[in-house]
Every structure is written in C-alpha cells, then in structure tokens.
Amino acid sequence: MNPRCRLISALFLIATVVPLRAADRNWAAYLGDAGATQYSTLNQINLANVARLERVWSFHTGEAAENNRSQIQCNPLVVDGVLYGSSPQVKLYALDAATGRERWRFDPFLAGDETAARGVNRGLTWWQEGSERRILFSAGHYLYAIDPATGQLVESFGQGGRVDLLLDLDRDTTGLALVATTPGVIYRDLIIVPVRVGEGPAPAAPGHIRAYDVRTGKRRWIFHTIPQPGEIGHDTWPADAWQRTGGANNWAGLVIDQERGLAFIPTGSASFDFWGGDRVGANLFANCLIALDAATGERKWHFQFVHHDIWDRDPPSAPVLCDVMRDGRKIAAVAQTLKSGHVWVFDRVTGESLFPWREEPVPPSQLRGEVAWPTQPMPSKPAPFARQLFTEDEVTNRTPAAREAVLRRLREANPHRPWDPPSERGTIVLPGFDGGAEWGGPAVDPRGILYVNSNEMAWLQHMVPTALFAGGIRPLYAQLCVSCHGPKGEGNAAQNIPSLANLGSRLKLDEIVALLRTGRGVMPSFNFVPEASKQALARLVLNPDAEAPADSREAATSSASSATGSPYVTTGYNRFLDPEGYPAIKPPWGTLNAIDLNTGEYLWRRPLGELPELTAAGLPPTGTENYGGPIVTAGGVLFIAATKDEKFRAFSSVTGELLWETSLPAAGYATPSTYEVGGRQFVVIACGGGKIGTKSGDAYVAFALP
C-alpha cells in the first residue's frame, strides 16, 4: 500500500470511529494531559509526510557528565510557544519552543540546599487560573513553585517558594530518604505529588499520598497507604507496621478524571522489596491502583495487583484514561500496564475489571521468616505483551558458544516459574526488574488503542543471608550497599553504578561520609545510620581488606543492628547476559505493541530497535532494551525514542510500519512531546543517554517538516 493510500485509510478509520477533538497546540501536562494519554490532536505531521522530518533546533545545557552517569528523563512541557524542561543536574530551563533559544534557568542549588539536585526529573506541572501561572517543579525532596515568566521562586508558596516533602507524613522521617522524580498532577487548586522512598532492607519512609494547595503549599489531605489503626487495610499488616514500615508510595505518577473528580494512583511495593517476613500479610495499599476523591483523598475503590510483593512488581508508570466500547456501550475506563507485561482495564467509576481475571496459585517461599501470599491475580485478556517463561527453548542461539554458556548458568538457578519467590540458589526474573512496561508509560488514542513498548530481558537474582557478612561493619555494607555495588564492590556497569575499586583515588574519607549523609544521583541518603557506623562504612569501602579497630567495630556493629533488620540481602539487579554481553534470551529484546482495549486483541507487534553489529552479521533486527514511552497523534503517527541504539523513530499507528528514523546525539530515554508554534508542528525529545552502557548527553532536539 503506497503512503497516500495508507494515509487515507488511517484518517478514514479514525474519523469513522470517533470524531477528532479540536487541535491543542500545547503540551501543557506531563504525558500530554491529565489522563496521561500521550496523545496529540495535531496532524500537520502525518503518514504521507513524516519521512520528510528534519532537525530544526538543538539545545545543549552544557552539563557534561563525568563517567557517563547522568541522564535526562524529562517529558517537557510546551505552553504558548515556550518549552520548559529539566537538565542532567535537575536544573529547570525555559526555551523558545520555535528556536531552542534559552530564556531563563532555575538552579535548585542556588535555593540554598546542596542536596536538592539529586536523582532525575521526569517532568513538570503547569497550573493556571485566570492570570495566575505557576510551574511546580521537584528536585530532591523539595517541591518548588516557579513563576514561568521569570524563572523566579514564588515566595508565598511554602517556605520561601518550596515545600519539604519529607515533612507532613504523619511519622518521624528524620534521616530517611525521599526524592520526587515524577511530576504531580493538578486538580483545581491542588497538586497531588508522587515521591520515591527507600526500597532496601534499611528503614524507609512511608509513601502516603498527599495533596498540597498550589498557592500556599499547605497540605490539604493525606491518604495513608500503610493504614493506621481503625483505617481500612490495617489488618493486612502486622499491627505496628504503620509505625515502622516504609514504601507503598506513588512514584510512577497518577492521573485525574477532571469531570468526575477522581484521582487514579498506582502504588509501589512495601520495603524491603525482596523479603517481607517483618510485614506478613497482603499489605494494602501497596501494589494497588487506588481511586481517590481528588478533592478530599477519600478512597472510592482499589485493586491490588500483587499481594505481599516480594518481587518488586509494582506498577511502573501512570495509568491512562480512555473510553472503550463494551456490548455497544461506551465505558469510561482506566488502564494500567505492569512490569509483568500485563494490561489491566477497569471501569473508572466502579473499579470493575473489564476483562475476566482469576487468583492463580503461586509457589511458596523457602527463605527463613518469609510467608509468601498463596495466590496472585491474573487477567485473562489482553494476553501479556512480554514472554512469561524462560525455558531452554528460549535460550539465545546467537552463537553455539553463547547458547552453551547460558544453558550452564540457567541450570544452576531454580527452574523458572512465574512468581517464583526470591531464593538463595538463584531466581530467574522474566520480564526483568525494569519490566515489561517501564516508567515511560503507554499511549492511547481516541479509538481505545493502547500502544506500549516493552523490554524482554531475563534478569537473575540471588538472596544472601546477612550473617555471611558477619564481622565488624560488613553486615551494614550487606544491608545498604550490596544490592547496588555488589558483594565485592564491583559495581554494575549496565545500571551505571560505579565500582568501589580504588575509591580512594576519587574520594576522601570525609567526602564518602558526606555522601552517606546526603546521597547523590540515584544513591539515597543513609543519614539515619549513626555517625560511628558511617565512619566505619567509609573506611571499609576505602580499604575492603582492612579491619576497623575493635572499639570502632563494636560501636558500629551495635548501632547498625538497630538500623537494619532483614536476615537477607539481594546481590543486586543483574541482567541475565551471555558472555559477550547480549541478552541470554532469544530476540526480540524490545518490542512495540498495539492493543485494542475494546476487544483485548493485538493489532500489531514489532521489534523496537536494533544493534547495528548484529544486523551487519545477518541477524534480523533484534529489538533493544528501551526506556521512555511513545506518543501518538491524530496524523496517524507514533513517535518513540527509548532504544539503546540512540535512534528516534516514527511508526504508523495503524499498521506498525516504520516510516522514519534518525540518529540522536545521545539516547532518548524519555517520552517526547509535540506542539505547534506559528502554524508549524514540532516534535521534541530529551537526549540524556546515560543508561545501559550508553553515553550521557545534555541535549533537547526538535524536528519539524521543511
């Protein structure tokens, strides 16, 4: 079918199913709108002309990263010709959206908090009422209010223009880690704010959901995701869990049904991710989709995707609002994609699943003290968009040597079963810890077609008794550091986690202690650890073979025992790779999928991304690991970067056909935005790289028709 025929077919299909909305020139909300549809009504760029796209401007922040460890994951806002985005160092920028010229910048470091610019920033929040306008912007554990005209703090908000999100959690959070990476969502004069908290065996902050007044910064309501006595769900935890357990936070984002006044909020796992012997029970409201009254925080309904999660299988992205047809009737629906590769679709008002589902028996845990929940919910449709079982038939056949090496390692671990609990022997995780679906989220068009990119990577996990690290400060290293830096401090290049080898050539003792206090990048603060323990831990990582003096060892061990409590620690988040660093499973390793939510059937599926060296060797495109989501437009075009091969691509949303691709200065591990200025449609992507072994970047790149 030639391009003109494809265009006519696509526009006819869309127009006959649902009338097009009036075009919105802006991209004024994270992921496009309050429903996170990642859909634009613009159609100047369409199936017939998308192949003519060209780069029209680039903007570099000038924040070159050392050792390729920084990223930009921002889905930028565009309002009335101005683009607002964040940088690798989590500074806020305003650019002319037609030219990329800088208008102003805001630096959280200059706001007086040297720990503010930590982690990543995935987007911003725009609020407007009458002539009042604000950008709500999070960095570290602060929420800032910025005047979009000047880039200056709105000092009447909170304390001098910012709110400390570590406060107002109805529990003492002194010294605990919390960072806000995903932007909040507006309902009237409220902003509901996602936060990320600790997930390891160390003490963690609770992930209670909070709404703040956008003018004053005062907390207006709170919903306790770890219920307190007398609240629904309290009996699904040990009686004192609300005083000591952390997690169950909304880190992935949320959506608002503005018409019905409902907030749909997915929640994370309870801490510790992989051992829950101290939180026996189903653990409501962890791993849930919760419908709250957006004005008051009152619970309307909830659905728990994982009971007593010990797999870190929490929802990875904001849900998406859409309309679907069922028995000739239009239903307002909310859909949630999961790391496991499943899509759940619910009636927004009742919480009823729109497809049948069942509670499926799952294996018990063999770890001491753990009580795994006996069943887990499974939807009947749609079918998973990622493979669920890693058998010998699925082992790579890229080369005979690679296959044999993977088979040997596969046979050393427990035979793979879905929902196989963490173990000391080794557990295969498929899809891997990053999904399946990941934080980029899906797009959905007005026909109810959902588009989701997926990783198909097996990972390996081992649990190790903390007692094996006995001696001095080593148990504390096991609790705090092993899951990222490894048992021997080897680091994890694929996760951009540095090795601790020769750390003394880079950092001094007092600098390491300072890092333990404040955290940096993806490393959380460990300020809850007593000072003697921080000092001893710093000495250990500087000289792993040396023993601390007996008196400091005794003091550190004594104080550490009160700070942590799990009898197990994970050895880390490790991809299952062959000896040459390629995935252990057969391709495809990354896919792009179109699913009709009206029927639960797939319209098309294709590999996403390729590795040039394997293509040159005669392999068909394998797909690659991918991070960041798609957007889809009324022009019938789906745009996505996300891939390890550092490409930006356009596909037909109707057929899945690849229509255009271009190379980026660094990988676009972010969700693009599209907008119109001066009658011209643009598409922009943040090019930050810095994941899965790819170089870091500092650019935003925009494309348009000649």
Image (cartoon, rainbow, N blue to C red):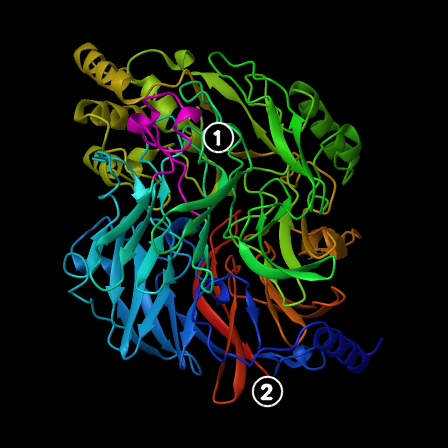
- Amino acid on which the number 1 mark rests in the picture: Gly
Q: Quadrant of the N terminus?
A: bottom right
Along the line of sight, the residue nearer the viewer: 675 or 40: 40
* Circle on res. 572: 1
Q: Quadrant of the C terminus?
A: bottom right
- Amino acid on which the number 2 mark rests in the picture: Pro
Q: Is 658 placed above or below 403 here?
A: below
Residue 633, given in percent of the width and then of the height, sits at: 61, 72
Give the labeled residue for mark 2. 706
What secondary structure is the stretch in magenta mostly built from?
loop
Q: Residues within 10 Å of mark 2 (few under 14, many from 20)?
A: few
Would you identify the image quadrant in which residue 295 lies? bottom left
Horizontal side of residue 90 vs 251, given as left or right: left
Horizontal side of residue 225 vs 618, given as left or right: left
Look at the image and give the residue range highlighted in magenta: 224-251
Residue 596, given in percent of the width and then of the height, sits at: 71, 58
Instruction: Find numbered disc 2 in the image and state the secondary structure of the residue it sits on.
Output: loop
Instruction: Find numbered disc 1 in the image and state the secondary structure of the residue it sits on.
Output: loop
Residue 342, given in percent of the width and then of the height, sits at: 64, 44
* Circle on res. 302: none
Q: Residues within 10 Å of mark 1 (few under 14, many from 20)?
A: some
